Amino acid sequence: MYIAFLILLIVYLAVGAILDIREYKKPRTSRIDENTRVKLYIKGLIGQWVPLAVILLIGAFSYVSLPEIGLGGFHFWGPLWFRIVTFVLCGGFLAVLLYQIIAYFVSAAFREQARLQFDSNTSKSHYDSVMANIMIPRTKREKTWFFFLSVSAGVCEEIVWRGFFYFLLVTVFPSWPIALVVVVASIIFGAGHLYQGPAGFVKTSLVGILLGCLYVATGTLLPGILLHFITDYSSAFILSDDAE
């Protein structure tokens, strides 16, 4: 049964990735308008919550408990060095994100530099084009919807691709070391972002490994959900509202 769930989840990711690649296969040379960007955010919201609802339904009928998919309390795991390295890396990553957010509010020079950088990035790699022209919110309305999308990504992706997916891999492949589970799951998760090009795949996979290590070290998805949300929503603090 769990093998079937694992296959279905991978197929769902693959189909979604293919559809996204087809939609974003050609880099855009100009920004899309507000309504189009908001529609993409709403589409992303639906794409986040539907698999989570299905997984929770599956869990209810297959007697998978919430702690088994990471929705429990803290229980620190692993050698001390692993936990220290994980917490230091996550702390450093969080500090960079918070710096970006704070600089957005206090420095007009930062906002101007970010605007110029993203304007110049529109003609560079596919990843830069997708991020600069499509994904990054600019107006207040866009940033409101992007907030909900970021919350959804933090909650849904962590439960689906860290909690439930790890549970399936560990159950189906009990001989795998946890390090292999983290790497394999992160690469598969990164493959779902291939619409962002090779750079997006690599960056997402690396962040996935970091979040996976945080989950393993703490025994709960809660810190990863928060860090995932901040990671995504920090993009809303790159460009100011007057950058339109």
Image: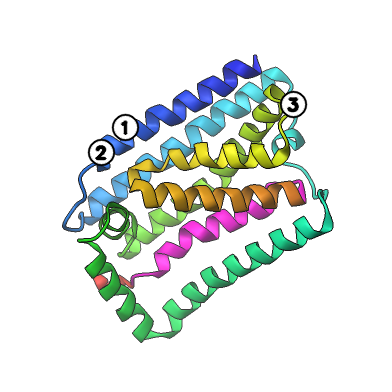
Q: Which residue is mark 2?
A: 23
* Residue 15 visible from this viewpoint: yes
Seen in the image, is 126 located left or right of residue 101?
Answer: left
Start-end of magenta stretch: 218-239
Q: Quadrant of the N terminus?
A: top right
Q: Which residue is mark 3?
A: 174
Q: Earlier in the sequence, mark 2 or mark 3?
A: 2
Describe the element under mark 2 as helix, strand or loop.
helix
Residue 36 image label? none
Q: State the image quarter where residue 183 is shown.
A: top right
Q: Residue at x 34, y 31 (%)?
A: 18
Q: State the image quarter where residue 69 is shown.
A: top right
Residue 222 lies in the magenta-colored region: yes
Name the foreground residue: 155 vs 198.
198
Residue 233 lies in the magenta-colored region: yes
Compared to residue 100, the image places residue 9 above or below, namely above
Q: CA distance from mark 1 to mark 2?
A: 6 Å
The amino acid sitting under disc 1 is: Leu
Marks 1 and 2 in Cβ contact (< 8 Å) = yes
Name the foreground residue: 188 vs 65.
188
Residue 172: x %, y % from top left: 68, 22
Identity of the residue furthest to the top in this view: 1
Describe the element under mark 1 as helix, strand or loop.
helix
Q: CA distance from mark 3 to mark 1?
A: 33 Å
Residue 221: x %, y % from top left: 68, 47
Q: What crowding class fits label 1: few (fewer than 14 Cα within 10 Å), some (14-19), or many (20 or more)?
A: few
* Residue 244 visible from this viewpoint: no
Q: Quadrant of the C terminus?
A: bottom left
Q: What crowding class fits label 2: few (fewer than 14 Cα within 10 Å), some (14-19), or many (20 or more)?
A: few
Q: Which residue is mark 1?
A: 19
The kind of secondary structure the magenta stretch mainly shows is: helix
